Amino acid sequence: MSLVELIARADSRGLAGSGLACLDRCLPLLDGDDEVLRPLWATLADDAGDGGGPDWARGLAQVRDKLAGPDAEGEDEAVLLARRMLAAAPAECSGARIRAWADACSVASLRVHRLLDPAADTAPGADVRREGGAAGGTDGLSPLVAAELRRQVTVLEVLAGHGPAGLRRALEVSTEGRRVLRAVVSRRARGRG
């Protein structure tokens, strides 16, 4: 099943987890510590499946405070995309807003990985295909972008198949992706310095 289809079929918890996982993997761009999103992950573990209600909104406000960065002046596109993911997160994990956020995070995270991958085509019109099947959907993609596409599919599949029990695996996938992106960001900073 394609990434677009998985997002279309996901429930509220799956959508919130998918968007949160994309943001989690992009934390190195926001200088966030690895634990900053833990409270939001914890709200998704609630058996009610509503994304934690007021706990999500409170946690989101705290995360935004902790990750508040400088004015957008002078930040590169990858950092701006990560900031927009956080800024656009809805206060409620239900309805059309959470679906739109999850979809936007998917696109933004793939773009971030494409911008940071020296082997990728970063032309403005060169968006990553998300409609192809998970197995063949990575043909022609650079390694960093292909890995991000696979991670997004895995997170959605795990959350769809296992509900709250899948959150641990989704978090593991995101943690692995964050480590990879942190190494890429570090290499990039050394190359500029």
Image (cartoon, rainbow, N blue to C red):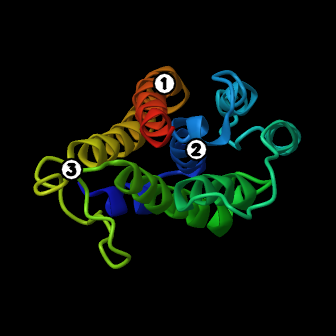
- The quadrant of the rendering that contains the N terminus is bottom left
* Residue carrying label 2: 23
Height in image: 162 above or below 71? above
Picture quadrant of residue 107:
bottom left
Mark positioned earlier in the residue sequence (3 or 2): 2
At 47% from the left edge and 43% from the top edge, which residue is drawn?
Answer: 192
**Cα distance in 3D space between marks 3 and 2:** 20 Å
* Residue carrying label 1: 175
Amino acid identity at mark 2: Leu
Q: Residue 143: horizontal and vertical position, in percent?
A: 21, 42
Q: Residue 59: horizontal and vertical position, in percent?
A: 83, 36
Q: Are marks 3 and 1 in contact (CB under 8 Å)?
A: no
In this picture, residue 43 sits left or right of residue 58: left
Q: Residue 119: horizontal and vertical position, in percent?
A: 22, 51
- Nearest the camera: 22 or 1? 22
Q: How busy is the neighbourhood of tag 3: few (under 14 within 10 Å), some, or many (20 plus)?
A: some
Q: Are marks 3 and 2 in contact (CB under 8 Å)?
A: no
Amino acid identity at mark 3: Ser
**Cα distance in 3D space between marks 3 and 1:** 20 Å
In this picture, residue 90 sits left or right of residue 95: right
Q: How busy is the neighbourhood of tag 1: few (under 14 within 10 Å), some, or many (20 plus)?
A: some
- Nearest the camera: 166 or 102? 102
Q: How busy is the neighbourhood of tag 2: few (under 14 within 10 Å), some, or many (20 plus)?
A: many
Q: Residue 131: horizontal and vertical position, in percent?
A: 25, 66
**Front of the two marks 3 and 1:** 3
Secondary structure of the residue carrying tag 3 is loop
At 32% from the left edge and 73% from the top edge, which residue is drawn?
Answer: 123
Amino acid identity at mark 1: Thr
Mark positioned earlier in the residue sequence (1 or 2): 2
Which dot marks residue 142? Answer: 3
Picture quadrant of residue 48:
top right
